[in-house]
Image (tube, grey):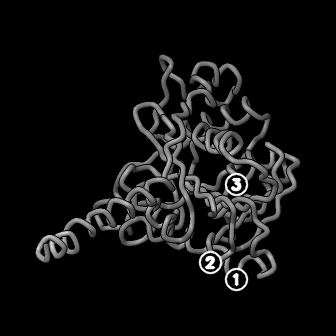
Amino acid sequence: MHYLFILLYKVYFPVLDQIGFFLKKTDKIGYMADLDASKNCVTINDAAEHWAPLKAFVHNGKIDLGDPASLLEYNRAILHKLTGFTIDVPVGNLIPSICLRATYIRAIAEFTTGVKRVVDIGTGATAIIALFAAHAGYEVTATEIDPMSLEYAKRNAEKNYLDIQFLLSKGSILTGVLPEGEKGRIDLCMTYPPFYPNDKPGFTSKKKRGFGGTDSELFGGTSGIEFSDRYVEECALFRVKYCTLMVHKQIYSEQIQEKLLNFGYSTKVVKILAGRRSRYLLIGILS
C-alpha cells in the first residue's frame, strides 16, 4: 500500500496536473474561421478597366508582380475600386497588399464587439490599415517610426478626408508614444508587423521584392518576431482589450499565441487565404 501511494504521488498525480494545465491553456485558444482575401479584392482585368494607369502594365490578363510600378498601380486600382481612396507611396517604401489589409479590418468588424478606439502600430507611408479602419467608422490613432513615412501617411489621410491622429513613435510601441492616461482606454491595437529576420548579406536583402520596403517595414528582429513580442507586452501594459496582429507563418502564429496567453490574453485565430498563401490574424482578448 505504501508503494502504491508513492507511485500515485510521483507518476499519476503529476500527469493529471499536466493534463489539467493543458486543458486550461487550450481552452483559451480558439480557431475562428477562414476568410478569403479574394472577397475583398479585384481581378487584374477589372482593376485595369477601373483604373486607367494600370492598363499599360497588363499583358494577357497578368502583371509582373516583381515590378514595383505595376504592383503599385494594381494596388491603387483595388483601393480606389473598394473605397474611392487614392494613395501615394515614396519610392522604395512598402507597397501593401490592399486585399489582405481590407480583410484584416473585415475580420476585426466580424470577430470583435464594442470597439470604438483603435491604434494602428507602424502604419507605414500609405497608412492603409488606418485608412480602412477610419473608413469603417473607428476612431483611429496611427503611429510610425520614420518621419518621412509619417508625413506621407498624414497626406494620404488628408487627401481622402479622413480624421486620423498620427504620432511619431521614435522606435517605441505604446510607452512614450501615448500618454499614460490612455492605459485602459484603448479598445483595440492592430499591426501587420515586420517579420523577416534581421538582414543577412546575400540572403534577405538580395531577394527580388516587387513590394519593396524599408528596414523598419520588413525586419522584426533576430528571429523575426521580437517586434511582435514587444507589441504583445505593450498591449498588456496598456490594458488593451483586443491585441491583434497578422503574421505570415503558422509557426509564428503559435509562438505569439503563447506570448499572448502568458500576458493574460485568450486568443482566437482567423486564417486569411491569399491565393496559394495564408496569413494568420491573431486576436488576443484580455481576460
Mark number displayed over residue 172? 2
Please report whichever mark, 3 or 2, sits nearer to the chain's N-terminal start: 3
Please report whichever mark, 3 or 1, sits nearer to the chain's N-terminal start: 3
Mark number displayed over residue 176? 1
The quadrant of the picture occupied by the N terminus is bottom left
Write down the residue under mark 3: 127
Residue at the spot 38% in from the left edge and 61% down from the top edge: 20
**Mark 2 Cα shell of 10 Å, populated few (<14), some (14-19), many (≥20):** some
* Amino acid type of the residue that numbered disc 2 sits on in the rendered structure: Ser
In the displayed structure, would residue 93 be above or below residue 102? below
* Amino acid type of the residue that numbered disc 3 sits on in the rendered structure: Ala
What is the spatial separation of the Cα atoms under label 2 and label 1, in whole angstroms?
7 Å
Single out the residue that lies furthest toward the top.
Answer: 60
What is the spatial separation of the Cα atoms under label 3 and label 1, in whole angstroms?
21 Å
Are circles 3 and 2 on residues that touch, CB within 8 Å? no
Between label 3 and label 1, give the one nearer the viewer: 1
What is the spatial separation of the Cα atoms under label 3 and label 2, in whole angstroms?
18 Å
How many labels were placed on the picture? 3
Residue 215 seen anywhere in this rendered image of the structure = no
Determine which quarter of the picture holds residue 16: bottom left
